[in-house]
């Protein structure tokens, strides 16, 4: 969880007693401690020690508790070193570099003010103009992370499938230990890494291979590679993803026994496939959550294309159920895309 920084106006005091360079608690003279913020869990404030004699020595600390006049801190912050301080040396709350860098990260894409749980907007994915298609374009966006602890905000980015993840737009984006493979699904994650926004690709729907140093992540979409390990051409419009050309996922003779069939939609998530299908005889398609005896979309007749209006829901293995309703039947199912309810709904 990212620490929330606290602030107070004109907070300053002097040390009640000397402390060594290893001390993690200290007290201030009089009631000066009450002038400073009182952090709770997940909160803190930066404070600065200054020597009273010359006011040239400084040490920045991160105070995590201010209770009953005793302040608890982490020493030697923001490029300073822990020093020993004398009674009546000065302690105050000032603006420090670490705070300003956090504000800059928010402006450029990084940790910002919290957003509602589950919130996501933007991060639209698209094929880059570079051929062959090894680069993915990611639009600017903002989202709550997977645990709703922090917000992730980012500017427009590009990432390549050519190698292991490296920080920054235009660099490689493969997760730890991964190399691009043919006919494989990859999930795209917006992340915070070392405090900065970035993007990477993973075969895991739960970011199991996220880059070292990643402190927060959010799933923003998926892509599949073709037989040449290139990003298959697709188009995203909000939560709708369309293939540049329909994919024939099923073309076989079926009987009255229900069976699961895999479609060209992302694994690891429930999605709504956009299909057309036909059968030489009666057939039925339905969502796996209904079990093996379901009967959702049904054709009675021969060679009639149907569009189930995205009412089907796949399981997390990208599957739906199908069976013949009249002996044997030749079934042809083409997947034209899918609706992914886990990404941003905006265009």
Image: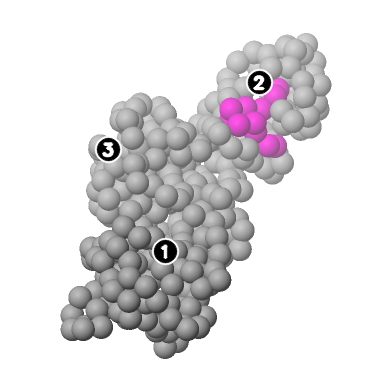
Inspect this view and state whether residue 298 appears.
Answer: no
SS at mark 2? strand
Q: Are marks 1 and 3 in contact (CB under 8 Å)?
A: no
Residue identifier under label 2: 260
x 78%, y 29%: residue = 290
Q: Where is residue 270 in the image (x, y as percent from the top left)?
A: 63, 38
Q: What element carries label 1?
A: strand
Residue at the extreme bottom of the image, as rendered = 10
Alpha carbon separation for disc pair 1 and 3: 43 Å
Nearest the viewer among 19 and 268 is 19
Which mark identifies residue 164?
A: 3
Above or below residue 199? Residue 245 is above
Q: Is the magenta stretch mostly helix, strand or loop?
A: loop
Closer to the observer: label 1 or label 2?
1
Give the residue at x 24% y 74%: 58
Q: Is residue 296 left or right of residue 303?
A: right
Q: Quadrant of residue 178?
A: top left
Magenta extent: 312-322
Tell me, yes or no, whether the two marked residues, 1 and 2, touch with CB atoms within 8 Å.
Answer: no
- Residue at figure coordinates x 38%, y 66% from the top left: 62
- Neighbor class of circle 1 (other Cα within 10 Å; few <14, some 14-19, many 20+) is some
Q: Tell which tag, 1 or 3, sits nearer the viewer.
A: 1
Q: Which of marks 2 and 3 is in front?
A: 3
Q: Residue 50: horizontal and vertical position, in percent? A: 27, 78
Q: Distance between the residues labelled 2 and 3?
A: 35 Å
Q: Which of marks 1 and 2 is nearer the N terminus?
A: 1
Which picture quadrant has residue 327?
top right
Which image quarter: residue 40?
Answer: bottom right
Q: Which of marks 1 and 3 is nearer the N terminus?
A: 1
The residue at which mark 1 appears reads as 25
């Amino acid at each position: 969880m990212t620490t929330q920084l606290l602030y107070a106006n004109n907070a300053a005091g002097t040390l009640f007693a000397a402390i060594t360079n290893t001390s993690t608690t200290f007290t201030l003279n009089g009631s000066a401690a009450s002038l400073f913020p009182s952090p709770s869990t997940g909160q803190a404030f930066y404070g600065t020690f200054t020597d009273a004699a010359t006011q040239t020595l400084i040490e920045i600390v991160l105070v995590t508790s201010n209770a009953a006049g005793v302040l608890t801190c982490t020493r030697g912050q923001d490029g300073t070193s822990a020093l020993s301080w004398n009674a009546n040396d000065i302690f105050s709350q000032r603006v420090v570099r670490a705070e300003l860098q956090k504000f800059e990260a928010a402006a450029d894409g990084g940790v910002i003010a919290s957003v509602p749980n589950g919130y996501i907007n933007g991060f639209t994915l698209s094929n880059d103009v570079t051929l062959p298609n090894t680069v993915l374009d990611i639009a600017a966006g903002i989202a709550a992370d997977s645990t709703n602890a922090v917000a992730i905000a980012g500017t427009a980015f590009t990432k390549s499938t050519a190698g292991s993840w490296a920080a920054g737009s235009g660099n490689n984006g493969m997760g730890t230990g991964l190399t691009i493979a043919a006919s494989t699904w990859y999930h795209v994650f917006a992340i915070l890494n070392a405090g900065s926004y970035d993007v990477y690709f993973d075969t895991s729907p739960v970011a199991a291979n996220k880059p070292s140093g990643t402190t927060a992540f959010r799933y923003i979409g998926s892509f599949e590679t073709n037989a040449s390990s290139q990003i298959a051409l697709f188009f995203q419009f909000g939560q709708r993803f369309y293939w540049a050309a329909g994919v024939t996922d099923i073309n076989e003779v079926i009987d009255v026994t229900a069976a699961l069939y895999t479609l060209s939609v992302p694994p690891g998530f429930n999605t709504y496939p956009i299909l057309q299908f036909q059968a030489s005889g009666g057939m039925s398609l339905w969502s796996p959550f209904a079990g093996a005896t379901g009967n959702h979309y049904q054709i009675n007749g021969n060679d009639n294309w149907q569009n189930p209006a995205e009412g089907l829901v796949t399981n997390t293995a990208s599957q739906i159920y199908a069976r013949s309703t009249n002996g044997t039947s030749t079934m042809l199912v083409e997947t034209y895309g899918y609706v992914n309810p886990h990404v941003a709904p905006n265009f």
